[in-house]
Image (cartoon, rainbow, N blue to C red):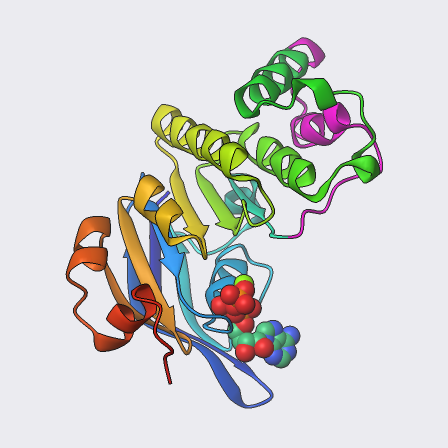
Amino acid sequence: MNLNINNLQKYYEGQPVLNIENLTIQAGSLLGIIGPNGAGKSTLIKTIAGLIKASSGSIYYDNNKFSSKIQKHMTLVFQKPYLLRSTVFNNIAYPLKIRNVERKEIEKRVIEVMDFIGIESLKNQKAWTLSGGEAQKVALARAIVIKPSLLLLDEPTANIDPNSILVMEEAIKKFHKENNSTVIIITHNLGQSKRLCKEVAFMNKGKIIEIEKTDRLFNSPKHSTTKKFIEGEIII
Ligand SMILES: Nc1ncnc2c1ncn2[C@@H]1O[C@H](COP(=O)(O)OP(=O)(O)OP(=O)(O)O)[C@@H](O)[C@H]1O
Ligand SMILES: [Mg+2]
């Protein structure tokens, strides 16, 4: 899915938290978004997902405005996963059920995705008994099982151990490669954005300061705030 964002602004109580002049994300992109706390990263992807209404500006999805049809082809994975009060299997199967996918096909796809992410052993476990990291893995599995054209990930590996992070990254890469979907991933793990993303955007104070090919952004950032951020200096 192509995304075209123009003059997108969001204010909370008169305070600007988002101000994106122009951002085009081509179909098939794997874009990372990095930036300090409060930069507006989550606000941006929640606005793209249609969960927050912008104060002004526009977002076009393959040249269309937001609609329930567009919404069916996208998924947002929150940092804090919301799971149904049911088993892991039912949680992952749910988005397929509501799309009227046949039972046999559901079974096949759920098993496949659980295998992919390494959570087969959790199949019958109740969602509320999962650890934080396990719940994040289930949330990722539930998101990719419907093969969305647009996958939005808000710090999907924030509570994950280092080895499982690599497993989840492989799953995201494989999903991206096989479906040529657009993937946007917010991460505080700079190594992760280097491993995973073709392009990275640096956000600060509601703005996209720069968006570049990953190597370029990390090796020769154009802006001093980007340089400070990636070198771990305090940005004022
Ligand atoms: N509902 C709200 N009411 C008022 N202010 C809000 C609201 N939601 C977000 N904000 C503010 O908007 C700014 C951007 O928040 P956002 O969650 O997008 O940041 P972020 O870049 O995702 O940060 P983090 O890295 O900490 O997740 C923050 O200063 C936040 O306090
Ligand atoms: Mg956030």
Which of the two residues, 211 or 167, is positioned nearer the viewer here? 167
The image shows residue 177 at horizontal and vertical percentages of: 34, 27
Q: Residue at x 66, y 17 (%)?
A: 106
With 145 as the anchor, is 99 left or right in this view? right
With 39 as the anchor, is 25 left or right in this view? left
Q: Does the magenta segment cover residue 128?
A: no
Q: Does the magenta segment cover residue 102?
A: yes
Which of the two residues, 51 or 115, is positioned nearer the viewer here? 115
Residue that extends furthest to the bottom in the rendered view of this protein: 14
Q: Is residue 15 visible in this depiction of the protein?
A: yes
Q: Quadrant of ligand 2?
A: bottom right
Q: In the displayed structure, would residue 118 be above or below residue 24?
A: above
Which of the two residues, 175 or 189, is positioned nearer the viewer here? 189
Instruction: Choose top left, top right, bottom left or bottom right for residue 229.
Output: bottom left
Instruction: Choose top left, top right, bottom left or bottom right for residue 143.
Output: top right
Image quadrant holding the N terminus, namely: top left
Q: Is residue 25 visible in this depiction of the protein?
A: no
In the rendered picture of this protein, how many numbered marks are placed on residues?
Answer: 0
Q: In the displayed structure, would residue 212 be above or below residue 98?
A: below
The image shows residue 128 at horizontal and vertical percentages of: 82, 39
Q: In the displayed structure, would residue 56 be above or below residue 116?
A: below
Instruction: Choose top left, top right, bottom left or bottom right for residue 161.
Output: top right
Residue bounds of the magenta highlight:
80-104
With 142 as the anchor, is 225 left or right in this view? left
The image shows residue 3 at horizontal and vertical percentages of: 35, 53
Q: Residue at x 44, y 37 (%)?
A: 149
Q: Residue at x 54, y 33 (%)?
A: 164
Image quadrant holding the C terminus, namely: bottom left
The image shows residue 113 at horizontal and vertical percentages of: 57, 21
